[in-house]
Image (tube, rainbow, N blue to C red):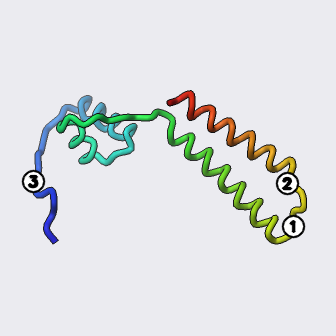
Amino acid sequence: MERKRDKQINIRLRSDEYLKVHNLMEKSDLCLSEYVRKCILGKEIVTVYGIKEFLEGLNRIGNNLNQLTRKVNQGKIKELGDDLAQINHNLNTVFEKILKTI
């Protein structure tokens, strides 16, 4: 199979330049090649700071929902009042943080 990108560009950077590029690349959640391509080809790079924390929070909430759903389906839980209230609160908290970030 033939590569779509068959040309290479090699550059040399000072340590401080490399660290700056590397930090910006990590914040963008892109691999180094994709980040540099977007930079030099004039494409806009949008970074949402704190997105990893949001995703972790959403993942925890999703896990809680899955556990509750399993227990309900197994007949182990008859009433979900307090658990659902806590999950609803967590979802609202994460949603508010997302809105503030945007």
Q: Residue furthest right?
A: 78
In this image, 87 relative to 79: left or right? left
The numbered disc on residue 52 is: none
Instruction: Name which residue type carries label 1.
Output: Lys
* Residue at left offset 67%, top offset 56%: 63
Circle 1 residues within 10 Å: few <14, some 14–19, many ≥20:
few
Residue 83, position in %: x, y?
A: 82, 50
Circle 2 residues within 10 Å: few <14, some 14–19, many ≥20:
few
Tell me the quadrant of the picture where the N terminus can be found: bottom left
The numbered disc on residue 7 is: 3
In this image, 16 relative to 73: left or right? left
Which residue is disc 2 drawn over? 80
* Residue at left offset 85%, top offset 54%: 80
* Residue at left offset 32%, top offset 35%: 45
Residue 48, position in %: x, y?
A: 45, 34
In this image, 85 relative to 61: left or right? right
Going from the N terminus, do you reach mark 3 or mark 2 first?
3
Going from the N terminus, do you reach mark 1 or mark 3 first?
3
Instruction: Name which residue type carries label 3.
Output: Lys
Depth check, mark 3 against mark 2: the one in front is 2
Circle 3 residues within 10 Å: few <14, some 14–19, many ≥20:
few
Instruction: Name which residue type carries label 2.
Output: Leu
Q: Are marks 3 and 2 in contact (CB under 8 Å)?
A: no
**Front position in the image: 61 or 14:** 61
Which residue is disc 1 drawn over? 76
What is the C-alpha distance between the residues marked 2 and 1?
A: 11 Å
Answer above or below: position of 27 versus 59.
Answer: above
* Residue at left offset 67%, top offset 50%: 61
What is the C-alpha distance between the residues marked 3 and 2?
A: 58 Å
